[in-house]
Image (cartoon, rainbow, N blue to C red):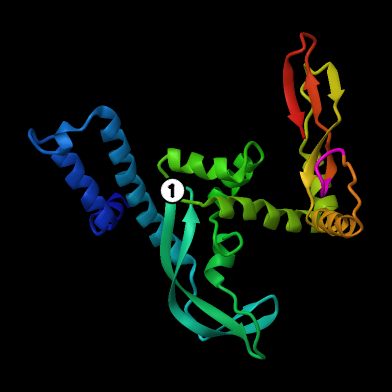
Amino acid sequence: MTQDILSTLSGLASFAKLQEFLMARSQEGSPEATLTFEAFAVALGHAVRGLENELKAADLSRYDLDADAVIVGGTEWHQCLCGQPKTYQSASGPITVRRNLYRPAGGGKSICPLELRAGIIAGLYTPVLARQVSYMMGQMTSEETSKLFNELGVSGPSSSSCDRLPKLLSTVWEDNRKAWEEALRQHEEVPAEASVVAVSLDGVMVPDKDGQREAKATREAAKEQGVCKQRSGPAGSRDVGCGPVTLSDEEAKRLSTVR
């Protein structure tokens, strides 16, 4: 098993680059040897992530299928595109693999068995990256999330990709919300030391696309009539509520919070 892994690594260009970089670092007088520790850490991170991406690409390709036809959801799908390269966003950077596409016999939108079997989200995000972006988007804006990945030395995802993912996941969540929330509640446990439960309510004004269109139409109508109407609060926004439930012990130490 170890020999197989070493054989695989030796055949990767990124592994050779990592070896060359480390050897150059130990050679006196080389550009790599003069790097500061900070610069070395950054360069090493890029080299290691390059190897990680190549290993991920090799493993992801294992989930592809190469057959004349496949059965998915009781429907027969026929191969319509063979070996088409596709770049996916991963937690260590973009990875590119070749995969096959299949279309139903009667025509229609094609599917990618590799994406279905590997759990690719929205045809772009690997599961780990989707989880990371979703968590970060709950704490900061899409632009800040994208900048954080760059600060960590990871190429991508863009701010628009970060902004798009929660919206895609939200649609799926809402379609299954009642059943999934019930399933989540079954896994909730109240710590034995919990003695206080606090339920909080708060709200925030968020932009609403329909509301913004209505607000614009109202402004234009008022302008035509020569009416100047004073508004309170941002136009085209609506109030959105949130309700955290917090458990604490007798000394008011927070044990858990569900938002």
Residue drawn 60% across the image and 45% down it: 142
Residue drawn 54% across the image and 49% down it: 129
- Residue sitting at the far bottom: 106
- 233 within the magenta span: yes
234 lies left or right of 140: right
The secondary structure making up most of the magenta span is: loop
- Point out residue 123 in the picture as x, y percentages from the top left corner: 57, 65
- Point out residue 228 in the picture as x, y percentages from the top left corner: 89, 47
169 lies left or right of 30: right
Residue drawn 24% across the image and 46% down it: 18
123 lies left or right of 154: right
Q: Which of 21 and 79 is in front in this view?
A: 21
- Determine the image quadrant of residue 111: bottom right
Q: Is mark 1 on a helix, strand or loop?
A: loop
- The amino acid beneath tag 1 is Ser
* Numbered disc total: 1
Q: Mark 1 packing: few (<14 Cα in 10 Å), some, or many (20+)? A: many
Q: Can you say which quadrant of the picture contains the C terminus?
A: top right
- Point out residue 236 in the picture as x, y percentages from the top left corner: 82, 50
104 lies left or right of 226: left
Looking at the image, residue 54 lies above or below residue 190: below
Looking at the image, residue 117 lies above or below residue 211: below
- Point out residue 197 in the picture as x, y percentages from the top left corner: 85, 22
Residue drawn 78% across the image and 56% down it: 209
**Disc 1 designates what residue?**
92
Looking at the image, residue 114 lies above or below residue 166: below
- Residue sitting at the far left: 29
- Residue sitting at the far top: 251
Which contiguous range is marked in magenta?
A: 232-237
- 155 within the magenta span: no
